[in-house]
Amino acid sequence: MFDLSQAAPRAAKLTALGIGVALLATACGGTPAPSTTGTTTTAAAGGISCPAPGAGAGAGNTAAATQTGPVPAATTTTDTALKIGSLLPTTGNLAFLGPPEIAGVNLAVKEVNAAGGVLGKPVEVTHRDSGDTKTDTATQSVTALLAGGAQAIIGAASSSVSKTVINQITGAGVIQFSPANTSPDFTTWDDKGLYWRTSPSDVLQGKVLGNYMATCGAQTVGMIVLNDAYGTGLQKNVKEAFVAAGGKVVAEELYNTGDSQFQAQVDKVVAAKPDAIALITFDEAKSIIPLLTAKGIKGSQMFLVDGNTSDYSKNFQPGTLKGAQGTIPGTFAKDAFKQKLLAIDPALKDYSYAGESYDAVNLIALASEAAKSTKGTDIAAKLKDVSAVGDKCSDFASCVTLLRNGKDIDYDGQSGPVTFSDAGDPTEAYIGIYEYEDSNNYKPVKEEFGKL
């Protein structure tokens, strides 16, 4: 059990880390975060007592000004319409991420076309399933999208799935733009400058989660980890941050995609008696969580990640996950954005990576306008330019108006600030922290902003 007398030195060690992650208020306009000094939730099993939510949690970014007047006509037009394909999961262990991502893509395409399209023609979009690594669905889908003339493909959600098709896509001179890949491996991939993502590398999510578990009072952590590029990459960064904060990882148990039995991993982790357990998994959490609770592990001892922070209200008895915490890259989805997404897909329950998907479409469309071309390699050459120094804008209509008036633009979207490195990675991002309620659904708690 955690000794509260150790809290002060732990806080001092966290402050001294200097990892480049600063806690901000949920509005990014420079307002300092609400103080949580001396205010925590009721102490839970395992000594876990996470900081209480700050006032206004979930408000999200203050958006840049949007277009109110007519959009100028394109001065350069194209004979070849911009064709975007999506490679997003409707089956497999990340299928819960498909609906918000697909809705984000469709909303952006709808808005782009309502503003007159790209270079005088409506954008065309074709959706295909990515599946997961248990199948060859992604390869078949990419083959179909390339045959259909896609100049950019948005996806996959899974880093491991993206690794199976990245050479196929970029080797064809087509942009691969993922809204959810977080494996650090893509930063150095030989992708000919054609791989981009709006979700930050797990170097950042790992730092945030590792340090957050420490601020919640955990002295020891056990991990159950999916043995793939996503899982082990995130595991490494969580562990490094937690150990640097003075904690100890006492158990690390792996499983493989397609596994259906997790009792052995759960038994070994629970036997190590950790204060907290990090579940770095996908949909397998639905099988793992009941095994943990049967061993006496409380929801408040569990820390989830973007691969499994989902609505479990229909899966578990009320209260099963009460007090559990989860992290998802990106800012909290704003109410106005949620309403637009619901108009696209009224059945939406989760909004994870909807903003990143929406931003991916807008950035591709704007880079196409800036390049005056719908060719994949030409678009890629302008993606960094439209995300960097220039007039701030946050939707296609506003940004394309600036471009057509000869201005440089700096697109900041629904996922937060977007500024790309030469490798196609975001150089700054928010990580949202969420807490589960008695219903087994989650609410926003706070956002942490970091630079990479």
Image (spheres, rainbow, N blue to C red):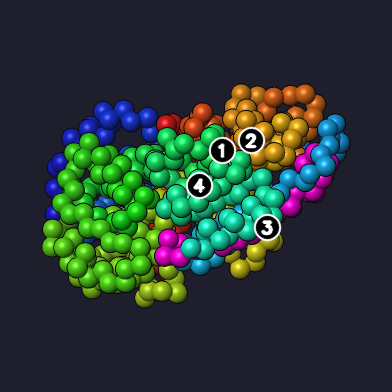
* Magenta stretch contains residue 126: yes
Q: Secondary structure at mark 4?
A: helix
Q: Earlier in the sequence, mark 2 or mark 4?
A: 4
Q: Position of residue 110 (x, y in %)?
A: 74, 52
Q: Which mark is residue 194?
A: 1
Q: Which mark is residue 166?
A: 4
Q: Secondary structure at mark 2?
A: helix
Q: Earlier in the sequence, mark 1 or mark 4?
A: 4
Q: Which mark is residue 6?
A: none
Give amino acid for label 3: Thr
Measured in 3D between alpha carbons, the distance from the residue under mark 3 to the one under mark 1, in whole angstroms, is 19 Å
Q: Is residue 251 left or right of residue 386?
A: left
Determine which residue is flagged by label 3. Answer: 126
Q: Position of residue 445 (x, y in %)?
A: 43, 50
Give amino acid for label 4: Ile
Q: Position of residue 145 (x, y in %)?
A: 64, 55
Where is residue 23, by image quadrant? top left
Q: Which mark is residue 377?
A: 2
Residue 135 against residue 204 in the figure, above or below: below
Where is residue 127, by image quadrant? bottom right
Q: Earlier in the sequence, mark 2 or mark 1?
A: 1
Magenta-drawn segment: 113-135
Q: Secondary structure at mark 3?
A: strand
Q: Residue at x 14, y 48 (%)?
A: 3
Image marks 2 and 4: residues in contact by CB distance under 8 Å: no
Quarter of the image where the C terminus is located: top left
Image marks 2 and 1: residues in contact by CB distance under 8 Å: yes
